[in-house]
Image: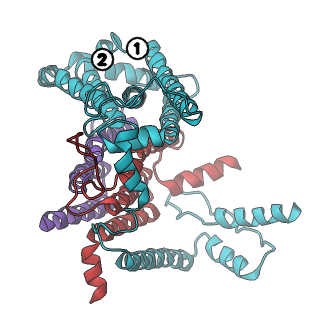
Amino acid sequence: MAFWQQLQFNHFQAAAVILYVLGMTGMRFNRNLIKKIVSMGFMDSAIYLFLTSSGFVAGHVPPIVTDPSVSPSVEVYSNPVPTGLVLTGIVVSVSVTAFSLALTQRLYKKYHSLDIDEILMLAKRGDD
Amino acid sequence: MAVIEYLLLGALIVCAVAANVTQKLLPTILIYMVFSVIMSILWLILQAPDLAITEAAVGAGVDTVIFLLTLKGINQLKGTGDRK
Amino acid sequence: MNKLLSLYRRLEAWVEGDAPAAPAHSAPPPPPAPAQAGPAPLRTLARRFNAPHSRMGRLTFHLMSVMACVVFSLVMLYTVSELPLFGEPTNPTDNELSARYIEQGMKEVGAANLVTNMILVYRGFDTYGESCVLFLAATCVIMLLGTDQNNTTAKDLRIRAEDAQIEREERSVILQGVVRFIMPLAMMFGLYILFNGHLSPGGGFAGGSVLGGTLILCDNAFGAQQVQRFFNETIYRFVKIGALVLYAALICYTIFAGANGLPSVFGPGTAGRILSAGITMPINVAVGLEVACTMYSFYAFFSKGEL
């Protein structure tokens, strides 16, 4: 079957898609805020995996010149663009995680709960 | 090489499922740390050593520390809560 | 304008109406939402999901989310199966852009690490924005978790003082011994990654994370007083803002000189030497300091609410 064969060739992308869906499912079905944040981390990593695997070229070496006397050519080095994009992304995702965890701590201090539904209900009751 | 790739990718998916299924919070975070370590090996396979160093330092180090400190802050770690 | 407002109200009612599953000890259920004027399908949906104890509605909602996840994964897998083959050199992602970065990057900028060339010089403004994101994240964490009258009670302060007392009395000898051995090596490794980022894998982000991790390790083993001997709040502010300003000045100068065709004082130099590649090494250092400060401030504010 062409579908399965193609998925075997693109196994990195297929795994990335499955990871993304798992993270999405976790974000939908977990009501604990910390588990939601962990699921968000899985989604981040899935996207990075997808991007980086699109820059991979079989048989080439990482884009770091070891012998500067030889002019670098496309036939030797793999694609540096996705690596650069993902490098900044990883550090930003840590900032996002830290920010959301700080928000979670403040929510816990106010409502003494990590359950998003309970927090929403208490917040609504507090508004009235 | 292909076998290692399949093993690591399978381990990633197992980690993602396990982190969602686990009930307690501490195992979830340790599984997330394992996920980051496996990810940093995969970056090496994908010809991105810059990413491998960053992920190992950030994902497995700083991220886990922040998560654990949050657990301590919300009294979910054993021996840190229940003080009046 | 009125129409827009009513539309917003309707949307708000629909979103808010997604009633949470009531826990056992909860108050009596809120009164059902008043009937909204609106198109019939939306109104029916709203009524179905608004009913607080409608088991049917909740079940439908869950089933629909499961269906959405399954359908989404199938669509995405089908898309992956239609993508070009993994690892082929003729893929559309390996186009003239990456060819340009690979072939001209070392000649024009001078760094042997082509990724560093790309993210620090060709796309330097982009990475500058990213450093600002780090700065903002650290600021937000300071605002949310810093010790002040609004978010800290006397109980919190007492618990924190008790924790500090316990930590001071029960310092782990094993941890101290290991850290005393590892910390110089780790710090040297971080500085090596930082200063050698244009020649070998690494750079500002990786080196800064390793440096920040080393500071966290030192704090854990020897306590905050030892770290504050060489890294207190004044130095933190100075380094964090100074790194950002240095980065901004360097990238602005490069853009000014490059756009006007002026001869830049930061020449490409000989590729492979430590003093080559113009502005990449100073920018790497600036980014690394920024990242290290951010990581350490995350740790400090999450653990004790002050630096």
Write down the chain letter for disc 1: C
- The front one of C148 and B34 is B34
Percent coordinates x, y for residue A39 in the rendering: 39, 57
In the displayed structure image, the side of residue C84 where residue C190 appears, left or right: left
Tag 2 and tag 1 share a subunit: yes
Tell me the residue at 33%/59% (across/down): A55
| Amino acid at pointer 2 | Gln
Write down the colour of chain C.
cyan
**Farthest residue in the right direction?**
C2
Q: Are the residues tagged 2 and 1 within 8 Å (C-beta)?
A: no
Is A71 above or below relative to C58? above
Which three-letter amino acid code belongs to the residue tagged 1?
A: Asn
Label 2 SS:
helix
Other-residue count near label 2 (Cα within 10 Å), few / some / many at <14 / 14–19 / ≥20:
few
Going by the image, does C307 lie left or right of A103? left
Q: Earlier in the sequence, mark 2 or mark 1?
A: 2
Using the image, name the chain to which the residue with label 2 belongs. Answer: C
The chain whose colour is red is A
Residue C164 image label: none
Could you tell me residue C254's position as x and y percent? 51, 31
Residue A3 rendering spot, x and y as whole percentages = 31, 85
Nearest the eye: C287 or C152:
C287
Q: Nearer the viewer, residue C195 or C59?
A: C195
Residue marked by disc 2: C165
Q: Identify which residue is drawn at 42% across, 50% down.
A: A85
Q: Is residue A105 visible?
A: no
- Residue at 40% over, 52% down: C100
- The chain that appears purple in the image is B
Going by the image, does A75 lie left or right of A43?
Answer: left
Count all numbered tags in the image, as a single digit. 2
Q: For mark 1, what is the residue?
A: C232
Tell which tag, 2 or 1, sits nearer the viewer: 1
